[in-house]
Amino acid sequence: MRTHYYMACVIIRLCLRIFWRYRRIGIENVPTSGGVIIASNHTAYVDPPFLGGVTPRELFYLAKAELFSNALFGWLISKYNAIPVTRGAFDRRAISRAVELLKEGKALLLFPEGTRNKGEGFLEPKLGVGKIALESGVPIVPAYIHNSGSLLSTLLRRERLVIGFDEPISSAFLKSLPRDKTGYKRVGEEIMARIGRIKERVRNKKF
């Protein structure tokens, strides 16, 4: 892990402990080496740095191309491994780059829903996540971040911000699926079902 990335993680974890009494569960499910996808729900702009800060791997992630229109901000997020992706289109360049990184043994953070979702339920997962997973063949660790969309009220009520990780979806499962839209959809459905499982654990305080 590079020094500037490590220092940012230390600062993020410190803030999470002081202000939101954050709890991390299931971190043992994240492999310490090798290519892996961390697939999480997405409710707030802070999700990428929060997830990156508490994961013991240096993460790469896809960020909407519009964020790079500001030269300074674009440079900053690039330093922390953001990869531009065009939303609303099947961005082959971004997908190819993601697969390449995973095959190099990197850890990639993805948000299957494709955008922030503040509703109670989950959005239908995008096919791009399944394509990246099947092309790379690496395990997928489902993740759930709880209360990141209501940081102020969480702070005032002293509720916890919780980040949980589930057991990996195995490479063997991925190999059993066809490399087409049917397979991509099946991957997305499995990811969201597993994220839902963590959500239930967190909401029922079973940790």
Image (cartoon, rainbow, N blue to C red):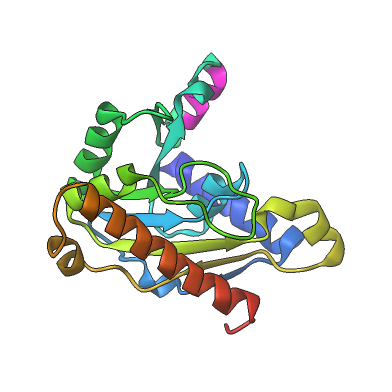
Left or right of 44: which side holds 30? left
Q: Single out the residue that lies furthest toward the front.
A: 182
Identify which residue is drawn at 63% across, 46% down: 44
Left or right placement of residue 38 versus residue 182 in this view = right
Q: Is residue 74 magenta?
A: yes
Q: What's the residue at 15%, 68% (across, down)?
A: 172
96 inside magenta stretch: no
Per the picture, the main secondary structure of the magenta-coloured stretch is helix
User: In the figure, residue 2 lies in which quadrant?
Assistant: top left
> Hey, which quadrant is residue 178 in on the image?
bottom left
Where, quadrant-wise, is the C terminus in this rendering?
Answer: bottom right
- Residue at the far right in the pictured view: 156
Front-lying residue, 189 or 168: 189
- Does residue 95 lie above or below 42 as drawn? above
Number of numbered labels in the structure image: 0
* 68 versus 33 height, above or below: above
